């Protein structure tokens, strides 16, 4: 017969519906000389929080980037409609000049838009990398032996 303690039983605990062992309790009962398991668990939790914060920064950056792209698209379409409305009302030479001017302005605006989008993406990546770098530095400081006062 199987031991009742080893059988997989469902639990009434909403935080542990499958009746899995409490790993925090198990770790707290383990005594390893020279290793603070609680501090190790806290460090792991802080690492997870840092990754979540970095992911949040990246997601916010992508959201800002997408929003800016939409604004740029709307501005471009509006400008295009205005240009198309004004071109064609003059002589062929004037129309060519207006088309050339519209093309120059459109190209310049496209370059400015690309620079702006690249800046948004770089800022987002820098923020996420700063979060991870700070956590890495905290981990390194935690590994260093404490200097006696």
Image: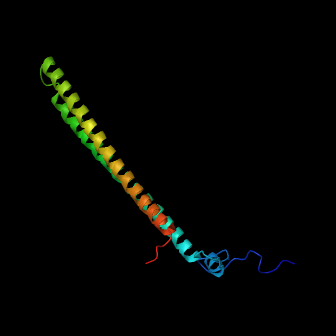
Q: Residue at x 13, y 25 (%)?
A: 89
In the rendered image, the vertical position of residue 24 relative to residue 83, given as above or below: below
Q: Position of residue 32 (x, y in %)?
A: 65, 76
In the rendered image, the vertical position of residue 71 relative to residue 39, given as above or below: above
Q: Residue at x 37, y 53 (%)?
A: 126
Q: Is residue 5 visible?
A: yes
Q: Residue at x 39, y 51 (%)?
A: 125
Q: Which quadrant, please, contains the C terminus?
A: bottom left
Return the residue nearer the eye: 66 or 118: 118
User: Taking 138 as reference, is 69 left or right?
Assistant: left
Q: Which quadrant, please, contains the N terminus?
A: bottom right
User: Taking 96 as reference, is 77 left or right?
Assistant: right
Question: Which residue, as the protein is rendered here, is positioned at the far right?
Answer: 1
Q: Is residue 52 visible?
A: no
Return the residue nearer the eye: 42 or 20: 42
Q: Position of residue 64 (x, y in %)?
A: 33, 52
Q: Quadrant of residue 117?
A: top left
Q: Position of residue 104 (x, y in %)?
A: 21, 29
User: Taking 126 as reference, is 18 left or right?
Assistant: right
Numbered-mark total: 0
In the rendered image, the vertical position of residue 97 relative to residue 55, given as above or below: above
Return the residue nearer the eye: 88 or 31: 31
Return the residue nearer the eye: 92 or 35: 35
Colouring chosen for the image of the structure: rainbow
Question: Which residue, as the protein is rendered here, is positioned at the far front?
Answer: 149
Q: Position of residue 85 (x, y in %)?
A: 18, 32
């Amino acid at each position: 017969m199987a031991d009742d303690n080893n059988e997989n039983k469902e639990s009434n605990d909403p935080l542990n519906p499958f009746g899995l062992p409490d790993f925090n309790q198990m770790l707290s009962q383990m005594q390893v000389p020279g290793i603070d398991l609680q501090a190790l668990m806290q460090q792991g939790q802080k690492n997870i929080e840092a990754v979540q914060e970095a992911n949040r920064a990246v997601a916010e950056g992508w959201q800002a980037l997408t929003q800016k792209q939409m604004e740029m698209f709307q501005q471009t379409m509006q400008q295009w409609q205005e240009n198309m409305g004004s071109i064609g009302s003059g002589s062929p030479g004037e129309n060519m000049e207006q088309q050339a001017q519209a093309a120059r302005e459109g190209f310049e605006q496209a370059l400015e838009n690309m620079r702006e989008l690249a800046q948004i993406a770089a800022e987002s990546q820098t923020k996420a990398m700063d979060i991870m770098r700070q956590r890495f530095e905290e981990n390194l400081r935690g590994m260093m032996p404490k200097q006696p006062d």
